[in-house]
Image: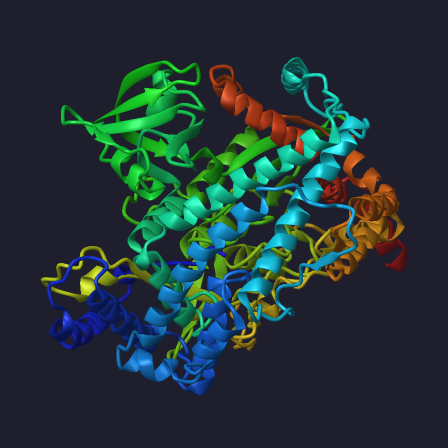
Amino acid sequence: MNAIVRFMKRNYKVMLVVAVLAAALWSFMPKKDSGDPEKDKALLELLTFVIERGHYDPANMDDNFSKGIYKDYITALDPSKRFFLQSDIDEFAKYETQLDDQIKNRDLTFFDLTYNRLMQRIKESKAYYKDILDKPFDYTSEESFNTDNEKLPYAKTTAELKEKWRKQVKLSTLSSLADKLDLQEGKTTSEKPSATLDEDSQEAAQQVLEQKKKEEVKIEKKPYEVLEKETRESALKSLNEYFSFIDDLNREDWFSVYINSIASRFDPHTSYFPPDEKERFDVSMSGKLEGIGARLQKKNDYTEITELISGGPAWRDKQLEPGDIILKVAQGDKEAVDVVGMRLDDVVKKIKGPKGTEVRLSIKKTDGTMKVISLIRDEVEIEETYAKSTIIEKNGVKYGMIYLPKFYIDFDNANARDAGKDIALEVERLKKENVQGIILDVRDNGGGSLKTVVDIAGLFIDEGPIVQVKSAGKKKEVLYDKDPKVEYDGPLVIMVNSFSASASEILAAAIQDYKRGVIIGSKQTYGKGTVQNVFDLNQFVRNSEFGDLGALKTTTQKFYRINGGSTQLEGVASDVAMPDRYSYVKMGERDIDNAMPWDKIDPAQYKTWDKQPNFNQAIANSRKRMEANEQFRLIDENAKWINDRSEETVYSLKLDKFRAEQDALEQKAKKYKVLSTYHNDLKFESLPYEKDQIAKDDVLKEKRVRWHESLGKDIYVDEAVKILDDLQPKSKGALSLKKEKTIKS
């Protein structure tokens, strides 16, 4: 989950920490090349020192702490138990209670042992799968494979490990073979555009589907032997690509895994960012980068362009296309560097660069031709990061919906986009369209900037407290919306789910405590009630030639609702709890063994919103609809079935039996197919400003078509609109409430 972050340079404590650390750490900063064990030792001491002094409630580094690191680290190295033998684990286990001492003594014995052994086992495994896939599988033999890696033991011998690889690979090819046979036997599904889209989107959707039909080819009937061989070739390709990715990882990458196993034992949200990861974190928080605006992926030894980001230099230039292969990269007029076989991260580093600089790419086009393309780097905005809105029409009434994927901000540029400014702009745009209510969707939103939460909540209330924050050993701090202006005072619904975390929970909690809007969604949100600070580790050392040391994100504060309760573990309970497919899956903060505890503090002084007399009635109406809605009942039943299915981990490796089992599952699942065919009676339409953009941008057009199409199948949006309808001053809910009050008086 994204942390709620405020950079340490904005916190007065940093000066004290820097002063102490600088004196303590300069003594062990010898001049070594990047990747040298001495750097690892220095990083180990630096990280633990910062955590112990900056963490809200640092754990004791004792034998229990050591056991937690050991378990997490070994699991991270080999989650499927397909590399290590039991003899390896027995050897590693000698250090299970010694890691706390090794950390304090800057001892890398355990890491070196596990790293070297892992490299050995990975090398051996390459021979296993290649040998296995070199000959046909016998799908008539009676055998099975258990996929529950967590409960199964490690292989005791090399022969046993090879057998596990054989069964694992066989299950993969068997599943693929069964799918191919199903296709040949005509078990396919059809698509058609949603009837809930506006005319422009409907037309665009139809064009997309027609293009897909043109690209479809008639399924060729192939002999069993050909299909079987194809599945092995496909599996070989996938495993080769997987091991190519593994080969790209260096010692520093694996040491980061070890470091993070240590950091995360203090709490689930304390973690180390290697330099590249820190850069990605910054991009995710700001939604911006400087480069050419292209997404890349590794394909064996080659780097392939998978997507051009709308508005970026590559998109504007119109010479690069998805599928193009990058062979060489040159900076300006300098000599080009061959990037074939280079790590993807290193290729990205060469292509990205400061705004206004030139990069030349030697490209192999999809038709085989070669081309050199010169691009001037620019600031690129990642559109998916930012808030977006749409107009919803039902029975001639307009409502607005805003989707916020994260609470983004650029800490280094006060004039840059941030979630608070953007939501305010979207609200203003929706008001101009005379919407009668607004839905703010923070489903799957893992958090972000604390400041933007205060700004966004302040759009919907009079001035007042939004959240309370407490640091270890200090008095609470109350963060206020100090602007008495209410940007929007109409009906409001906040949509959440089990993945809404951190900043999303602060927003939902504040809106709920003020009774300003109705919170709908999962029974409760994720349950992350802590604040993280990001420490740039480079500020703590002087004259180091280790290069960039990365950053540390650690928990420094806890936040509390204005009613005094914490969202930690408990999250925010929805006013209207709605079942979803994850209702019975353990996935919240409360399900993590070392999560920080729930507690509460004194409430802040605040006044609830009193401008919606039918607020409680709207909630009551929605709950009644939940109880009577057959679709929601089926969703809940499906969620229970999915949870039960997750407990079934044994699969037959006999083709006929496997297909029979899958057919039986398909028959059981048929009753839930209706869930995927659901359509609400809502119409969705982009706002005028976006229609102008869509007219010039086919990529954006297709993205909005897909979004509107998914909203048209979203029963939760349908219920949100019904609640907005009930919140209207002249709604049936309001009138029935008024009538009830009249009778009582």
Left or right: residue 598 versus residue 298 is right
Left or right: residue 8 versus residue 558 is left
Q: Is residue 83 above or below residue 44?
A: above
Q: Position of residue 635 (x, y in %)?
A: 80, 49
Identify the colour scheme used: rainbow
Counting the numbered discs, the total is 0
Q: Position of residue 187 (x, y in %)?
A: 80, 30
Q: Position of residue 526 (x, y in %)?
A: 59, 61
Residue visible at 58% across and 54% down in the picture = 500
Left or right: residue 577 versus residue 211 is right
Residue visible at 41% across and 86% down in the picture = 62
Quadrant location, the C terminus: bottom right
Residue visible at 46% across and 49% down in the picture = 407
Q: Nearer the viewer, residue 278 or 164?
A: 164
Q: Nearer the viewer, residue 707 or 33?
A: 33
**Res 26 → quadrant:** bottom left
Q: Is residue 224 above or below residue 174?
A: above
Q: Is residue 544 visible?
A: yes
Q: Nearer the viewer, residue 737 or 104?
A: 104
Q: Nearer the viewer, residue 251 or 497?
A: 251
Q: Position of residue 293 (x, y in %)?
A: 36, 30
Q: Is residue 473 visible?
A: no
Residue visible at 66% across and 48% down in the picture = 170
Left or right: residue 483 versus residue 493 is left
**Res 437 → quadrant:** top right
